[in-house]
Amino acid sequence: MSAHEYFIGVLSGTSIDGVDCALVDFAQSPPTLVATHSLAIPAPLRESILTLSTDEKVSLIELGETDIALGRLFANAVNQLLAKCDVSNQEILAIGSHGQTIKHYPFGENRFTQQIGDPNTIALLTGICTITDFRRKDMAAGGQGAPLAPLFHQSFFADLDGRRAILNLGGIANISLLSHGELPLVGFDTGPSNVLMDSWIDAKQDLPFDSDGEWARSGTVNEDLLTLLMAEPYLHQASPKSTGRELFNAHWLGEKLSHFELLADVDVQATLLEFTARSIAESVDWQGEQVVALYACGGGANNVYLMERLQSLIAPVPVASSSEAKLDPQWVESMTFAWFARNAWYGDPVDTRSVTGAQQICIHGAIYEALSD
């Protein structure tokens, strides 16, 4: 019997900046992060993904071609990861591919969520069984389909000494209040994290993100704009709830800014960062929920000023990077889908009812076998 139990998690998130891969060994408890790899998304492919994510009417040809191109990129990322750590594809039980979300509509009679990155392509180009399509099973079971990360957060980060909160600061922010004693696991999308800040600095300074939040720090928060942003109805909905670029995008921001034409660009950035921090801080009754510590992951965990503002707003609850809880913030999400792949591989159901609002417990993930030699 092998001494290892290898699964790979791979995804590209709401920020659409790159593909992250994590090789995880589940032979130990907690599981071990063995190796990681990131691969940038080429600019033309990123533009196609953004078009599919934001335009109401899209070409079926562009959808199909982008699906295949992204599948190839995912496969390349996995193969580069294995070459880097000198592990054979035959040693990997399965790849868990989240894919790239292009539409997420968790409301209406025919609710749906759609991810692309063709799993057939991934399976055949890597020679590894690929498990994907995790979110649609949850939605079919009556859930929001997102966020799913709280289930992995509970498995990895739960602590006997108190109730921890895990905050994922990707394009969209989602929070997990881990179960402790009689307190159940709760998770939901709080609203935007990096998506608005990144799009603004890209438009105004041709930069992909605001390093350490320094541009935002140099500006002044406009309280009138902040009040208007905080009035967004989504922020005041009860959980379960989930959101994405369908709501929080450049068009949404442009409508708000139409009332503030003379506002300096840097002050908009400062207000967007404060909006992110406030919308997160006000989404939870920290004392009532008995949270003893908040650990942040995702790209936003590297935003020094955002982390400072969060700490100020939710004190005395301490705020720290997930690295303080023994997992690098960049790799929490990719590890999440290695974990989901492992559950699907063994036929183990996952209970998302308290997080997404699903009405039944399901096995999440569709399995795409690779050809054997």
Image: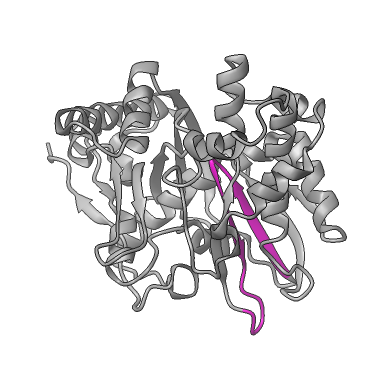
Q: Is residue 89 above or below residue 354?
A: above
Q: Residue furthest top?
A: 206
Residue 90 or residue 336, whichever sits in front: 336
Q: How many marks?
A: 0
246 lies left or right of 51: right
Q: Residue furthest bottom?
A: 182
Residue 154, image x, y percentages: 56, 65
The residue that appears at 38% across and 18% down in the rendered structure is: 42
Q: Is residue 138 above or below residue 252?
A: below
The residue that appears at 67% across and 33% down in the rendered structure is: 260
The residue that appears at 61% across and 74% down in the rendered structure is: 179
221 lies left or right of 149: right
Query: Which stretch appears magenta?
Result: 163-183
- From this viewpoint, is residue 322 visible? no
- From this viewpoint, is residue 294 visible? yes
Residue 355, image x, y percentages: 49, 69
Q: Main secondary structure of the magenta part?
A: strand
Residue 5 or residue 141, whichever sits in front: 141
Residue 320, image x, y percentages: 76, 48
Instruction: Indicate yes or no whether the magenta region holds residue 178.
Output: yes
346 lies left or right of 239: left
Q: Is residue 21 above or below residue 349?
A: above
Placement of the N terminus among the 4 image quadrants:
bottom left
The picture quadrant where one finds residue 60 is: top left
Residue 197, image x, y percentages: 62, 33
Placement of the C terminus among the 4 image quadrants:
top left
The picture quadrant where one finds residue 358 is: bottom left
